[in-house]
Image (tube, rainbow, N blue to C red):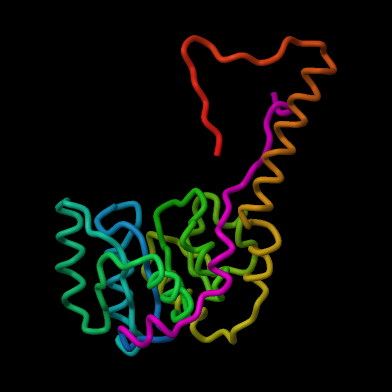
């Protein structure tokens, strides 16, 4: 029943708030680019369409961070990327370099066919990047009217959203939204509140305490 359903969103680590571009710019010589980070070769990520859009914007650098999967889709994606000199394939990078990449980019692009959250977009948004993301799935819940949403099946939609995001002046509204709603500390408090409400309701009904079934062990950090 609806009364038994509780809404607890995904969260993001507060360390992305302190992202700075220096490490990334020093190592790669790139700044104010369009960033994609995630799996390379997962069809759901819609990366081949994003690459074709990069071909339509040759004056803009596109940076791809992620480990290619051992799949034909990944091979096709990497081969397509070679056609565009403004596309930079960096592969796997350290966590520190990724955080710095969020600080150095201007736009995070995630035009997936569907996303539950778009965690990398939350991370980049908290670092101050503008966000271009799929309209399908959970992103509108997280980003409200502060992201550029795309029809992932239409290259024109993706291209127009990236151009609009690049033209926007920087502001902190998305950063503030994420920091005020989706940091893990805030989410943990919400989850604790759910547990307390459930336990209080059971106590009010005088139900026996919850016990593990069979040989179940639970570890909580």
Residue situated in front as seen by the camera: 26 or 53: 26
* 42 lies left or right of 71: right
* Residue 163 appears in the figure: no
Query: Quadrant location of residue 175?
Result: bottom right
Does residue 25 show up magenta in the picture?
A: yes
In the image, the segment drawn in magenta is: 1-27
Residue at 80% from the left image edge and 25% from the top image edge: 200
Which residue occupies 70% across, 38% down? 192
Estimate the x, y position of residue 100 in percent, counting from the top left: 44, 76
Q: Position of residue 10 (x, y in %)?
A: 57, 49
The picture quadrant where one finds residue 160 is bottom left
Q: Position of residue 193 (x, y in %)?
A: 74, 38
Identify the image quadrant of residue 162. bottom left
Position in image of residue 101 (x %, y %): 41, 75
* Residue drawn where x is 21% and y is 80% of the image: 84
- Horizontal arrangement in the rendering, residue 76 relative to residue 5 (left or right): left
Question: Residue extending furthest right?
Answer: 204
Q: Is residue 189 visible?
A: yes
Q: How many marks?
A: 0
Q: Which is more toward the observer, 149 or 24?
A: 24
Q: Is residue 56 magenta?
A: no
State whether residue 41 is above or below residue 213: below
- Which residue occupies the foreground of this view, 38 or 96? 96
State which quarter of the image contains the N terminus. top right
Picture quarter with the C terminus:
top right
Q: Is residue 192 left or right of residue 119?
A: right
User: For the point 40% across and 69% down, which residue is it?
Assistant: 98
| Left or right: 57, with 126 as reference point | left
């Amino acid at each position: 029943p609806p009364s038994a359903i509780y809404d607890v969103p995904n969260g993001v680590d507060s360390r992305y708030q302190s992202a700075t571009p220096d490490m990334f710019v020093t190592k790669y010589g790139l700044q104010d680019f369009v960033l994609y980070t995630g799996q390379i070769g997962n069809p759901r990520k819609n990366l081949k369409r994003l690459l074709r859009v990069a071909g339509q914007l040759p004056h803009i650098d596109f940076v791809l961070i992620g480990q290619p999967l051992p799949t034909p889709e990944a091979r096709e994606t990497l081969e397509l990327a070679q056609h565009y000199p403004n596309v930079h394939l960096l592969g796997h990078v350290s966590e520190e370099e990724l955080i710095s990449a969020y600080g150095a980019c201007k736009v995070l692009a995630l035009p997936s066919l569907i996303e539950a959250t778009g965690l990398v977009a939350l991370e980049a948004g908290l670092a101050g990047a503008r966000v271009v993301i799929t309209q399908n799935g959970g992103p509108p819940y997280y980003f409200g009217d502060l992201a550029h949403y795309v029809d992932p099946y239409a290259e024109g939609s993706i291209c127009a959203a990236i151009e609009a995001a690049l033209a926007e002046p920087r502001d902190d509204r998305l950063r503030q939204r994420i920091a005020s709603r989706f940091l893990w500390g805030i989410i943990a408090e919400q989850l604790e509140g759910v547990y307390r409400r459930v336990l209080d309701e059971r106590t009010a009904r005088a139900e026996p305490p919850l016990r593990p079934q069979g040989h179940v062990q639970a570890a909580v950090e």
